[in-house]
Image (cartoon, rainbow, N blue to C red):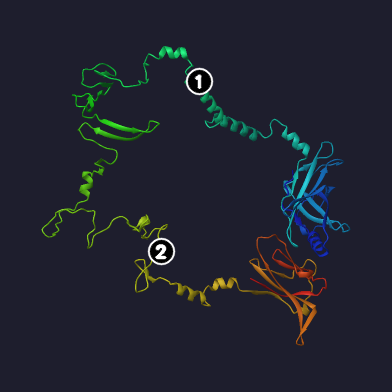
Amino acid sequence: MSEYGAITPTTNGLTMITESVVKKKPIVFTKIAIGDGALTNQNIEALTALIRQKQEAPIHIVTDKGAGLADVSAVITNAGLSTGYYARELGVFAKVGDTGQEKLFAYTNAGANASYSPADGSLDEKLITVTFKIGTGATLKVALNSQVYLTLGNLEEHNTSSSAHADIRTKITNDINTHNTSSSAHVDIRTKITNDINTHNSSSSAHSDIRRMFNSYLPLTGGRISGRTYIDSMLSVGQSSAIASNIRVDGAAGNAYIALLNYNNTGNLLIDGYFNNPETAVIDVTNRNAQGTIRYRSTLMDGNGNAKFANEVYANEKLLATKEYVDSKKWGSTTIADGAVTPTKLDRAYLPLTGGTLTGSLSIDGGNNIVHYIGTAGGNLNLGDATKTKSTALCCINRPIWWNNTLARNLALEEDLNTHNASSSAHADIRELFKWKKLYSVNRAAFVMPASGTALCDIPSTWKELHITWIWTKQTYTINNVVGHYSYTANIINEAIADPIIFVFPGSEGYLVVKNNKLYVIHRGDTDDGAPVLIMWR
């Protein structure tokens, strides 16, 4: 399969476009030809035929794809081809109207990316499609989308092969396996099976013989006792014990006993531990989630008799302060006289009325939980909150300054910026970008139509906009005994549009083409007296 690059309209093709616009006749695509000619220094636009044509075929179909796109297709086979060749070049031929002369409209060459077309003897059939995009007005755009495709027979042979689409087949298999093994797959089926099993198991008539056998016994492991159970003596777990507890758990580190409302008849819950190494043993209380992961762990008693809690401790719904917290809130040996009271230590939670240092950010609650703050997050002094503070005012008699420990600069005010912007010397570089510069001018009577294919003038490659004044030398009018000429002015903007740019003056009174940073005069109008007398650019 040849890999063709961009297809380029020839000079004849561009002329056909202009002729089609002027005469209001359609461009009729007639055939597609291929050959093995190699490009050396040839100018594609100047070509009128293929370099060395080998085969051609009439246009099979032209398909309107919408949005200005049209597919031009032809089928070329190797029937009757005596010698094979490399299909390097491809050309599309067209004419203007049904009676126009057929000419080479567009051309492309695959070069080293050309594929080999064999001689007759083995079937080789190609469907060649070239896609053109025609814009609005007189602008023609050629989509770089030319390819050579396999025939339907080749495609069907590929699709029925067991080795075709191996990646797609593998993905489908993997997706099905992933779906079937997912816990969320077939939820309706899984739910129905579970419900049916539960309904069966909960039925009073299900497993009646087994139920009768086990209803009178508690399982050796687990199980549930309904109603109140009375324990008159010790309930031992592991082995019997004479300790005054009624639940016992044996372990390698020692034994633990729990008395349930039966210790010295006081009604207390007693947790009693007997440890092999009491100096390092602890009695803990844990809080776990449904998966068994510990959320919090507190020590009721360690080997030294201390308690350690995971979070804050409350008494009578009031938070208890730790020794470290209380110590951190006191002064050293400072003495401050206050009447008859002379405290030696003051709470650090308050800032003195005079002096003192505030650490951290100062938050200001303006009500409704709208908090502003003064802080130094990230090394910056922040005044206010970026999402909640509406405005910040700098209140002072003199103008605020900016100071970086070396330089002091006044802050600019709005009126300072307005005065600067209104100055004729401000933004000189920007003003220069928007200044019009003369590119071409001529006396209307001295204008001479350039030879075919010759540019009227070159355009700087950095141009953004062209301003053209067009005058009709023969069409005049008279006002107050002063004779004037009819004229048009036009601006062409260099945006992201295709090259060439074709501009048509109203009433088909002149045609200009901008191509490769050159300006061409294609047509002087129906009266053949139009002329550009001034061209400006910026």
Cα–Cα span, label 2 and label 1: 70 Å
- SS assignment at label 1: helix
Q: How many marks?
A: 2
- Vertical position of residue 434 compared to residue 125: above or below: below
Task: Name above or below for residue 186 compared with residue 512.
Answer: above
Residue 359, position as x, y percentages in the image: 28, 56
Corner quadrant of residue 168: top right
In screen coordinates, is 363 left or right of 10? left
Q: Residue furthest bottom?
A: 481
Determine which residue is flagged by label 1. 200
Q: Is residue 478 above or below residue 34?
A: below
Q: Amino acid at mark 1?
A: His
Q: Earlier in the sequence, mark 2 or mark 1?
A: 1
Spot occupied by residue 488 in the image (x, y as percentages of width and height): 73, 74
Foreground pick, 474 / 157? 474
Rendering quarter of residue 83: top right
What residue is drawn where x is 41% and y is 58%? 386
Considering the numbered disc 2 on the image, is that residue within a helix, a strand or a loop?
A: loop
Residue 161 vs residue 316, the one in the foreground: 316
| 339 to the left or right of 179 | left
Residue 391's label in the rendered image is 2
Outermost residue toward the left? Answer: 340
* Labels 2 & 1 near each other (Cβ < 8 A): no
Asked if one can make out residue 406 in the rendered structure from this viewpoint, the answer is: yes
Instruction: Using a 10 Å C-alpha cutoff, classify the residue at mark 1 as few (fewer than 14 neighbours), some (14 to 19) or many (20 or more).
Output: few
Residue depicted at x 23% and y 17%: 241
How packed is label 2: few (under 14 Cα within 10 Å), some, or many (20 or more)? few
Q: Splitting the image into 4 quarters, where does residue 121 fall? A: top right
Task: Name the kind of residue labelled 2 in the image.
Answer: Ser
The image shows residue 197, relative to residue 74, as above or below, that is: above
